[in-house]
Amino acid sequence: MIKNIEGTTIEAKSENEQFELLEETKRKIEEFWNLCILENPSLWNGELMCVEECKRKGKQILITCKKSNYAHYLYDERIGLPKEYACSSLGAGCLLETSDNYYIVGELAENTSFPYCLQISGGSVDKDDIKDGRINIFNTIIRECQEELNINLQDEQQAKHFKIKYISLPTETVHTYIIFAKGKLNMTRVQMQEYYAQYLKYLKEKNLEVEFGKIHFIRKDRTAEELENLKNPKRNYLKSLLEIDSKETDNVKW
């Protein structure tokens, strides 16, 4: 469920406590993870933040998290867990639009945990985004765009502006919270395509991690049709996010 949160501030913190799971659940997650890394040795069970509470207070959204890991998240996403043990992970990303009004959608590389899946640039909040218990959502957004697309959102030559604009709230089947910024680039679709091709070539030549095997461009005025034409698996939020942004006057405030 996507909501417009433009004009609010995000106050997120980590309690520096581990999310508690039953021993039997831990065992099942460990067995599942061992099978996952047999299939894909490049997977990494990194630390991530699991939302304990998320509430709106005036012009603020207050989020409190505990620590968990990627194995917990992946098990919940693929197998499923009861609500009280679900991994309601906290993530963030940026919906990027070219100067000629195309959305940039990444296709995850073959060696990732969701090969060929379509999503915008983004990922989970991790320990690098936390200082003195405070979670810096902007740091997550900036870091992910730099790593995945080689876009520096703080460089005015690359990006005109970006700001936090949307939140994806959990559903019965998808338990994640995702904060989305919206960014406008100074590059056209063609320029961005050429720019990313060079970045991808660099990553492969240096044997560095490739997160997006390719990128797609979705026309802002033809979002539904162009997404439909792409037969790849898609993140649950993707269709709703692009549609709500393409009809800005229809956005629903939270």
Image: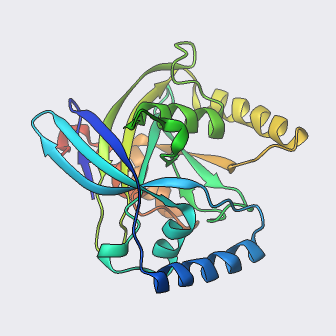
**Residue 200: which quarter of the image?**
top right
Direction from residue 206 to residue 37 in the image, left or right: left
Would residue 249 be found to the left or right of residue 204 on screen?
left
Q: Residue at x 38, y 60 (%)?
A: 176
Q: How far across and down, in percent of the image, does residue 137 sit?
A: 41, 36
The answer to whether residue 20 is seen in the rendering is: yes
Tell me if residue 68 comes above or below residue 199 in the rendering.
below
Relative to residue 107, is residue 166 depicted above or below? above
Can you see residue 253?
no
Q: Quadrant of residue 231?
A: bottom right
Image coloring type: rainbow
Identify which residue, 164 or 87, lies in the foreground. 87
Whole-percent x and y of residue 217?
56, 44
**Going 50% across and 53% down the picture, which residue do you hit?**
48
Is residue 105 positioned above or below 235 on the image?
A: above
Exactly how many numbered labels are in the figure? 0
Residue 252 as seen in the image, left or right of residue 129: left
Residue that protrudes farthest toward the left in the picture: 58
Q: Which of 6 and 222 is in front in this view?
A: 6
Residue in the picture at 24% in, 55% down:
53
Residue 42 screen position, x and y as percent: 76, 61
Residue closer to the observer: 46 or 194: 46
Q: In which quarter of the image is the N terminus?
A: bottom left
Work out which residue is located at the far top of the displayed protein and give it: 157
Which residue appears at 59% of the width and 49% of the height?
Answer: 106
